[in-house]
Structure formats: structure tokens, C-alpha cells
Image (cartoon, rainbow, N blue to C red):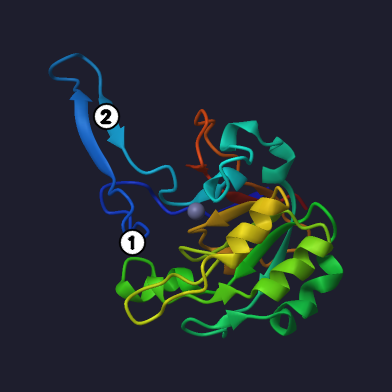
């Protein structure tokens, strides 16, 4: 059994979304002092490889610990959109080749290749999912959207206003979830991967870190 780790490490060097809390680790106990090692860990609820609950964009929507766990485990379908380019729009034309594998309940793995820029300012200039393409994926019964970039929508900055997170709103309205900061999606080169991206059960939270993997069960 081969397990591909789709997660980035969480620690003081983790690159976070602009404005999000930085990760801080403080030694709370040490072997020398208390006889054991224990960390005090501080980070935002959407740090590192994580999933967003619908509550992230809607006050009246389910929170991360209220969601059916089947959203986070199941067959994955790789959607190869490498070549979309910096701030490239991922349109249905780029996705349609993968359409036959996009059955209801499939976990969509949107492979932009942009995780290669993780740790640099260019990481924020990632490709993003077009709203019409998102509607078509929702129409096919997709409820789990994972991307190897910091955001499924365009990330605004001083030169790019963004679009107001339309894809986050569409998926939240449909009761779906979004996985961000995935990596190694290009290594999911085998048929019928089993994907697991179960979030920590943070009570009432908008999202939570995950250890995401793709498993080759052949
Ligand atoms: Zn998020």
C-alpha cells in the first residue's frame, strides 16, 4: 500500500494566508524541567493543509465539527490543470477532460502545481477556480474541492481586487467543503486513489487543519 502525503508541515515557518495568525510553538514542558516534552501551540483555524466548513462564509451554516465525515474520505479524482498560470482562471474547458471520473461524492483534487511556489510571495498568485466551473462540479454532485494553493478563489492584493470569493459562497451554500494548501497532488498518478482529509474536531470552528493523504490500494 502506497500512501502519498498531501500535507504541508505546520510550524513557525508555515506560510499563512495574508493577515492570518502566524504559527507559534512555545515549549510548555521539557524533559529537563518536567520530565516530558509538551508544546503550547498557537495557530489560525485555517493554517497549513486544512478544510473550510460552510460556516467560514455563512453564519447560519454547519461548522467543521458538525459535518458528515464522508465529505472528507472517499474516492479521489485528479483534475490536472497545471499550466493555468499565475492568477489563471480554471475554467470548465480545463476541467472537462476529467469529467467522466467526477461522480457524486468524489473528492476533487485540483492539481495546479502551484505548491512548487510554497514559501515564496508567488504562492499568492495561484490559479483559481472559475465560478461557472464550480457550479458545474456542484451539479455533478461534487462536494469536496481540494487545491494545492492557498485559496480556491483568487487571493486579492493591492494590484488584484479579487472577485469576492464567489466559489467559497457557492460551495458553502451547497453544504460542501474546501481543502487548501494541499501539495504533492502531481504524485497521485495511480487510478482510483482513496483520499482522506479528516479535520481536527475543533468545536464550532470555521475550519481545521488536516493530515491529507491519497492511498493507492492496488
Ligand atoms: Zn480555507
81 left or right of 209 in image: right
For the residue labelled by badge 1, is the local secondary structure a helix, a strand or a loop?
loop
Q: Could you say which disc has been placed on residue 40 in the image?
A: 2
Q: Could you say which disc has been placed on residue 94 in the image?
A: none
| The residue carrying mark 2 has its beta carbon less than 8 Å from ligand 1 | no
Q: Residue at x 59, y 59 (%)?
A: 168
Distance between the alpha carbons at the discs numbered 2 and 1: 23 Å
Compared with 86, 69 (above or below) is above
Compared with 44, 95 (above or below) is below
Mark toward the start of the polypeptide (2 vs 1): 1
128 left or right of 34 in image: right
Asked whether residue 180 appears in the rendered view, the answer is yes
Residue 156 horizontal/vertical position (percent):
41, 72
Furthest toward the front, the residue is 60
Residue 211 horizontal/vertical position (percent):
52, 44
Q: Residue at x 82, y 63 (%)?
A: 139
102 and 57: which one is in front? Answer: 57
Furthest toward the top, the residue is 34
Q: Quadrant of residue 60?
A: top right
For the residue labelled by badge 2, is the local secondary structure a helix, a strand or a loop?
strand
Q: Residue at x 71, y 36 (%)?
A: 68
Tag 1 residue: 18
Compared with 145, 128 (above or below) is below
Residue 20 horizontal/vertical position (percent):
33, 52
Residue 112 horizontal/vertical position (percent):
56, 74
Mark 1 is surrounded, within 10 Å at the Cα level, by few (under 14), some (14 to 19) or many (20 or more) other residues, namely few
Q: Residue at x 50, y 49 (%)?
A: 50
Of badges 2 and 1, the one in the foreground is 1
Mark 2 is surrounded, within 10 Å at the Cα level, by few (under 14), some (14 to 19) or many (20 or more) other residues, namely few
Asked whether residue 215 appears in the rendered view, the answer is no
| The residue carrying mark 1 has its beta carbon less than 8 Å from ligand 1 | no
Amino acid at each position: 500500500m502506497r500512501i502519498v502525503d498531501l500535507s504541508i508541515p505546520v510550524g513557525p515557518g508555515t506560510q499563512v494566508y495574508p493577515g492570518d495568525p502566524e504559527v507559534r510553538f512555545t515549549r510548555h514542558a521539557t524533559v529537563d524541567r518536567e520530565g516530558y516534552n509538551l508544546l503550547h501551540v498557537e495557530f489560525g483555524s485555517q493554517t497549513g493543509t486544512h478544510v473550510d466548513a460552510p460556516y467560514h462564509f455563512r453564519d447560519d451554516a454547519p461548522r467543521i465539527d458538525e459535518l458528515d465525515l464522508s465529505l472528507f474520505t472517499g474516492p479521489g479524482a485528479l483534475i490536472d490543470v497545471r499550466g493555468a498560470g499565475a492568477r489563471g482562471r480554471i475554467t470548465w474547458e480545463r476541467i472537462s477532460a476529467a469529467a467522466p471520473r467526477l461522480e457524486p461524492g468524489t473528492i476533487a483534487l485540483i492539481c495546479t502545481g502551484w505548491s512548487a511556489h510554497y514559501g515564496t510571495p508567488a504562492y499568492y498568485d495561484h490559479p483559481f477556480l472559475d465560478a461557472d466551473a464550480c457550479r458545474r462540479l456542484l451539479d455533478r454532485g461534487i462536494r469536496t474541492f481540494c487545491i494545492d494553493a492557498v485559496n480556491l478563489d483568487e487571493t486579492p492584493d493591492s494590484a488584484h481586487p479579487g472577485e469576492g470569493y464567489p466559489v467559497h459562497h457557492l460551495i458553502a451554500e451547497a453544504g460542501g467543503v474546501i481543502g487548501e494548501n494541499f501539495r504533492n497532488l502531481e504524485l497521485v498518478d495511480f487510478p482510483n486513489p482513496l483520499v482522506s482529509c479528516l479535520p481536527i474536531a475543533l468545536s464550532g470552528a470555521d475550519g481545521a487543519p488536516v493530515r491529507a493523504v491519497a492511498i493507492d490500494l492496488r
